[in-house]
Image (cartoon, helix red, strand yellow):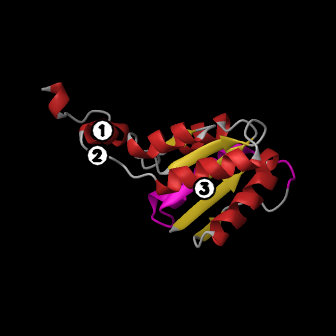
Amino acid sequence: MKIAIASDHAAFDLKSELAQNLRDWGHEVLDLGPDSADRVDYPDYGYKLAEAIACGDAEYGVALCGSGIGISMAVNRHPAARCALVSEPYSAALAREHNDANVIAMGARLTGPDMARTCLQTFLVAEFQGGRHADRVAKLTEPNISTQEDA
């Protein structure tokens, strides 16, 4: 798979480590920056990541900042992105299985490298279950869509 990864300065080290893990696992990595731990603004990198997902440059994304909150908010401003902030493997699995998340977000100040790696592995192997979840996920991209549950 081709996976885009981006962070702010607070998560630069975690980004570098997870990018290498992804390569070691056989994935192609699109590193959207930053290239150092110098101060940057997380929205800029969240928007770049969302655009990479939207235009098909990557199948999935990894968004990282100090808490994971800010960058996940930035990514989710794009209707093609479904970014889930996670801190443990169960939420990482549910993000894929129930919400068809295409981006995982984590906070480098809150989630250690081992847990972040486990969350990422879990996220990548989980599959969207579809079924009753499909209509709900469709509403994330098209809020005014009518579904069977609405009838």
Residues under numbered marks 3 and 1 in contact, where contact means CB atoms less than 8 Å apart: no
Q: What amino acid type is highlighted by mark number 2?
A: Gly
Can residue 114 be seen in the rendering of this structure? yes
**Are circles 2 and 3 on residues that touch, CB within 8 Å?**
no
Q: Residue 96 in the image: x percent, y percent?
A: 44, 46
Q: Nearer the viewer, mark 3 or mark 1?
A: 1
| Image point (19%, 33%), residue name | 146
Locate the C terminus by quadrant: top left
Q: Is residue 39 left or right of residue 102?
A: right
User: Label 2 belongs to which residue?
Assistant: 130
Q: Earlier in the sequence, mark 2 or mark 3?
A: 3
* Mark 1 vs 2: CB contact within 8 A: yes
Disc 3 secondary structure class: helix
Q: Amino acid at mark 1?
A: His
Q: Name the side, left or right, on which 3 lies relative to 111.
A: left
Mark 2: few/some/many CA within 10 Å (<14, 14-19, 20+): some
129 relative position to 4: left or right: left
Q: Which residue is mark 3?
A: 48
The amino acid pointed to by label 3 is Lys
Which residue is depicted at the point 52% across and 37% down? 91
Q: Say whether residue 103 is magenta.
A: no
Mark 1 → mark 2, Cα distance in angstroms: 5 Å
Disc ID at residue 133: 1
From this viewpoint, which residue is outermost toward the left? 151
Look at the image and tell me whether residue 45 can be seen: no
State the SS at label 1.
helix
The secondary structure type at the circle numbered 2 is loop
The CA distance from mark 3 to mark 1 is: 28 Å
Which residues are drawn in magenta? 37-61
